[in-house]
Image: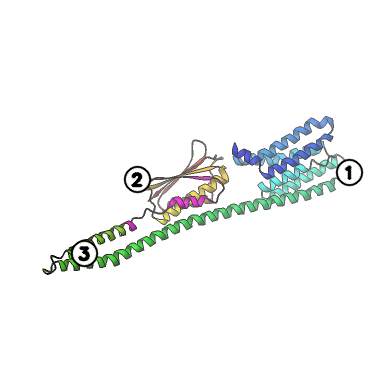
Amino acid sequence: MTSSIHKLLLPFNLAGLCTLSAVALSLRWIAPEAAVLGWATLAAFTLAFLLYDIARLRDTWAGHALLVLMPLLALLLLWLTPRSGSSQVLLVVWTAAAAMAWPLRWAAVAVLLADAAAYLILLRQGHFSPLTVTLMYLGFQAFAALIAHYATSAERTRDALARVNADLLATRALLADGARDSERVRVARELHDVLGHKLTAMTLNLRALGNDPALAGRKELHVAQRMSQELLGDIRGVVQSLRDSCGLDLATALHALAAPLPRPRLQLDIADDVHVTDPVLAETVLRIVQEALTNSARHADADTVRVALSMRDGALQVRVEDDGRLRGALSEGNGIAGMRERVAALGGSLAFAANAHGALRIDASLPA
């Protein structure tokens, strides 16, 4: 409900409502015998215009049907009020919506057909200058179509840049984590090879001195032997703790992946026994979640995506589901195909299903 209200209050819808209000004012001069049908037609156009954004997210064909219905209603109102000069404004509003939804070539053909029909209506109704009026509104429609098209292109480019930025942030987080692990291993190796070797040599020399009858009773020698043994044990403990990595920080990488996206919001649940040390496995998890976030935002209109990572039978279990709604049958495009290829390369399995709320659920099992 909140999402639907938000869409009704988008700037494009508010501008459209202002324009429709102006058209409604012009209906004061409609012929009395056509008033009821005229008001009903304008109300139907307004309803179709407001419902379009909501309908296309639930069913693509429903959105297309409303886009086809709107020019028919506009032409009907033009037939009823050919001399008011405002009815064709509805075609300008519709053109902007069509240019955002359809390829520019299809929208151009549809606009030309609608304008040809408008010209014939004005000619049939005895308008004093049908061609001039039609060409004038055609210019307005072209202007509206170009603005809508470039606005949509800019929005898509912005979303693409946000996804690329999120990808870079997540990859950087993994690389930084991997670099820290490599540095810990390098320091551990240096401590073991250099300090450990020298301390061992020192311990052996102290033991040899302790076997000398002249020094056997010296308290200082026993203290030095004890301290060298303790120091050697401490070095071994430090080396072991440095080598014992907790794995790559998947939580930070996944949050970095979702942070630049305005929606959906990422809800992450990682079990305590999940420790991923393989960068390829971590990269696969990132790509699965990334594609799920993109699909949820683009196709399901979801507000939240839940990601759960757990271990079962030596395999990493990845479950992703959102609170949106799967529209129609799942169509596997390049993104899902790439997801399958990544999982198959690791010898894992991938499954898609609808959850209890009708949203898409992704289950992946990856050998860890």
Q: Residue at x 78, y 49 (%)?
A: 138
**In this rendering, which labeled residue sits more in front, label 2 or label 1?**
2
Task: From the image, tell me which residue sits under label 1.
Answer: 128
Q: Quadrant of the N terminus?
A: top right
Tell me the element at label 3.
Answer: helix
* Residue 299 as seen in the image, left or right of residue 366: right
Q: Residue at x 59, y 52 (%)?
A: 159
Task: From the image, tell me which residue sits under label 2.
Answer: 313
Which label's residue is closer to the chain start, 1 or 3? 1
* Residue 71 as seen in the image, left or right of residue 218: right
To which quarter of the image does residue 78 belong? top right
Tell me the element at label 1.
Answer: loop
Asked whether 201 or 312 is in front, the reply is 201
Residue reaching furthest to the left: 213
Task: From the image, tell me which residue sits under label 3.
Answer: 224
Binning the other alpha carbons within 10 Å of mark 1 as few (below 14), some (14 to 19) or many (20 upward) gives: few
Residue 177: x %, y % from top left: 42, 57
* Residue 284 as seen in the image, left or right of residue 334: left
Tell me the element at label 2.
Answer: loop
Q: Is residue 253 magenta?
A: yes
